[in-house]
Image (tube, grey):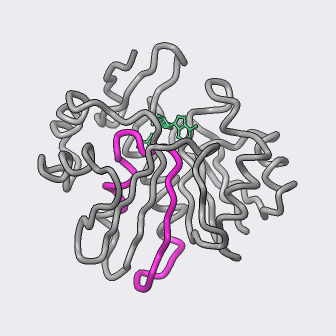
Amino acid sequence: MRSWIKTKDGSLSLYVEELDETYHSRHGAVTESKHVFIESGLAQFPTSGQLNLLEVGFGTGTNCMLTIEQTLQRNIHYQALEPHPLTSDEWEEVAKSGLPLLDKSFLKSISECASSLQVSENFLLTIHRETLQDVVLEANHFDLVYYDAFGPRAQPEMWTVDCFQKLYKAMRQGGVLVTYCAKGQVRRDMQSCGFKVERLPGPPGKREMIRAIK
Ligand SMILES: C[S@@+](CC[C@H](N)C(=O)[O-])C[C@H]1O[C@@H](n2cnc3c(N)ncnc32)[C@H](O)[C@@H]1O
């Protein structure tokens, strides 16, 4: 069962009872998304040109909407994996959260998105209703990966060498993966796949996060 919680910066997140896990940091959902994915990931790329982005765990679309805000002159193809999409009632709640760009028609399109949705002239969104384990990803394709799976305690199957190898193959040379997790074992497993792993200061409540470069 999923229920809404208000995080410390006032933004909403979901709590999953069976996993005893939240979709975002309790210290601030939007604060965490901005710090880990936007500032430590997206902001590292030029503001023009083509960017192929993969998000693992689309959830409430928070990372996606914050990315749309930053699109500027970039052409972004934003592909996301989400095997357990929000219900239409949950999307209604998201619509009340006050995030920019969250108008009802956009949310309706997201929740019904079966394949690709042209959000704006230069932002294409594709949501795959598949797991990371099952999806087939194009090789050497992605410039940037937002790795926003549930944490290793709640979902250890998302933090395996097999998962990181799959992402490594799908990323182009020089591509960047960012995640809020900085566990030593995760870092070592990423390194064993060929990633160069950096530890960066984490968002509020977390000492460090990971940026991994192919
Ligand atoms: C931490 S939440 C993501 C939060 C999301 N980025 C947001 O802004 O709301 C983790 C997400 O991973 C999804 N997920 C669970 N198992 C998965 C799998 N095997 N492959 C890909 N995504 C998975 C969950 O349904 C959930 O939406």
Q: Is residue 189 left or right of residue 56?
A: right
Query: Does residue 43 appear to the left or right of 190 in the view shown?
Result: left
- Please say whether residue 63 is one of the residues in the magenta stretch: yes
**Residue, x 83% and y 57% (percent of image)?**
193
Q: How many marks?
A: 0
Image quarter of residue 205: top right
Q: Position of residue 182 (x, y in %)?
A: 70, 43
Q: Is residue 49 above or below residue 44?
A: below
Q: Please say if 207 is above or below 102.
A: above
Question: Where in the figure is residue 131, as x and y percent of width and height?
Answer: 55, 41
- The magenta stretch is 44-67
| Horizontal relation, residue 21 to residue 110: left or right | right
* Residue 9: x %, y % from top left: 34, 37
Percent position (x, y) of residue 10?
29, 34
Residue beneath the point at 60% across and 67% down: 138
Q: Quadrant of the N terminus?
A: top left
Where 137 sits versus 209, above or below?
Answer: below
**Which of these two is toward me, 139 or 40?**
139
Q: Residue furthest right?
A: 192
Direction from residue 63 to residue 137 in the image, left or right:
right
- In this view, the residue in front, 71 or 164, is 164
Q: Residue at x 65, y 64 (%)?
A: 170
Q: Quadrant of residue 117?
A: bottom left
